[in-house]
Amino acid sequence: MNKYTKIYGVDISKDVFDVVDSGDIHHQFSNTSKGFVSFLKSIAVGSLVVMEATGYYHYRLAQFLFKNGITVSVVNPLSVKRFIQMKLAKVKTDKSDAKAICAYGKVNEVPLYNALTESQAECLQLFRLLDNYLKNVPLQKIIFTGRKF
């Protein structure tokens, strides 16, 4: 038996995130601060929010929820994918993914999320900025120690 009042499965993308709770109720929120606050208001006390690790998209929501006292779990996307495959699910939508993530959280002991410190968060942002810069600059134009690659 699960110790949480309710479990929420979250499928997050660039613009929105879909949420399905353990009562099979679906909601969609904008992936903005306003959407985060709306979701926070709808979470029952003593609940668990489970989401896949999706790079920057999951990070912002997980940090926000954690800092507001919500129990959060960030799980490996491959684990959820294999879980969905075992159930032989053929439908692939954001809503169905959120439902599957919720089901995954119900039947598995998921790891609890620990928020990053301010220094870790700043380093992560700098790495992402550098990565974004390197993706947008053609390799031939990057000069390292006076030589072109």
Image (cartoon, helix red, strand yellow):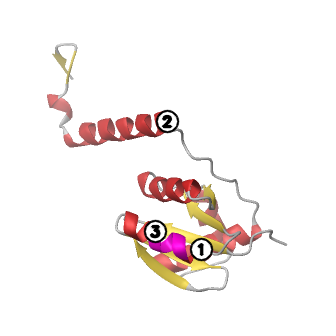
Element marked by disc 2: helix
Residue 128 lies, with reference to residue 27, above or below; the image says: above
Q: CA distance from mark 3 to mark 2?
A: 24 Å
72 vs 143, nearest the viewer: 72
> Which amino acid, mark 3?
Val
> Measured from the top left, where is residue 35 in percent x and y?
41, 70
Residues under numbered marks 2 and 1 in contact, where contact means CB atoms less than 8 Å apart: no
- Determine if the magenta segment contains residue 24: no
> Measured from the top left, where is residue 118 in percent x and y?
48, 38
Q: Which residues are magenta?
A: 37-41
- Residue farthest along the top direction in this orientation: 145
The circle drawn on residue 37 is: 3
Side of 85 where 13 appears, left or right: left
- Residue farthest along the right direction in this orientation: 1
Q: CA distance from mark 1 to mark 3?
A: 10 Å
Image quarter of the C terminus: top left
* Precedes in sequence: disc 3 or disc 2: 3
Image mark count: 3
Q: Which residue is mark 1?
A: 43
Which quadrant holds residue 126?
top left
* Precedes in sequence: disc 2 or disc 1: 1
